Amino acid sequence: MTDAMLCDDEAWDAFQRRDRAYDGRVIAGVLTTGIYCKPSCPARHPLRANVRFFPDAASARATGLRACLRCKPDEIGRERVAVARAVALIEGAEEVIGLEALAGQVGYAPHHFQRLFKRATGVTPAAYARGVRARRAAAALDTEERVTDAIYEAGYSAPSRFYETAADRLGMTPSAWRNGGARN
């Protein structure tokens, strides 16, 4: 067993399906080739008898296996760190950070980082930033006396940018929200 929640049969099934959801949860070591892969590796599958599962890459390396050059299982941690850093940058930014600047700060090409971020979070960096600004706006509407002050406090460059999507994001007009309208 690789861990308490993941038995070898479940790990093998994930490996056979090339299931990205299991990347980082289990590592497949191929004893005949001496390599270890993540479950989503696009390489041809070995025979089941030649595969052993490990909870992490360090455990696989400890048995003398080396990382697959095709799926690069050691980069899973690097990708997670990059996404976590990008999330922190987005949430801490006063103004919107463009994709190129964000990707550059975490060490990836913009197009590749966009795919990586979306795979990890389910949304693009721009959509995530819009959600952060919408949460800030909702909080600012509760504390600021004027709606316009709340809009600028949330990081919008102009009221028109906020009003474009305010009703969809808040479920009501900003002034109704500020006045304590029915909230979901």
Image: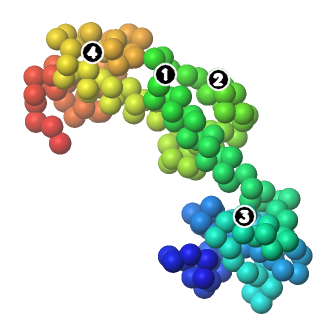
Mark drawn on residue 150: 4
Q: Tell me the CA gap for discs 2 and 4.
A: 26 Å
Measured in 3D between alpha carbons, the distance from the residue under mark 1 to the one under mark 3, in whole angstroms, is 34 Å
The amino acid marked with disc number 1 is: Ala
Query: Residue 2 placed where, x, y %?
Result: 61, 77
Q: Earlier in the sequence, mark 4 or mark 3?
A: 3
Q: Is residue 43 visible?
A: no
Secondary structure under badge 4? helix
Is 179 situated left or right of 136 in this image?
left
Disc with the residue nearer the chain's start (1 vs 3):
3
Residue that numbered label 2 is attached to: 101
Classify 10 Å Cα crowding around label 3: few (below 14), some (14-19), many (20 and above): many
The secondary element bearing badge 2 is classed as helix
Residue 103 vs residue 44, the one in the foreground: 103
Q: Which mark is residue 54?
A: none
Left or right: residue 103 compared with residue 183: right
Query: Residue at point 27% right, 15% down?
Result: 150
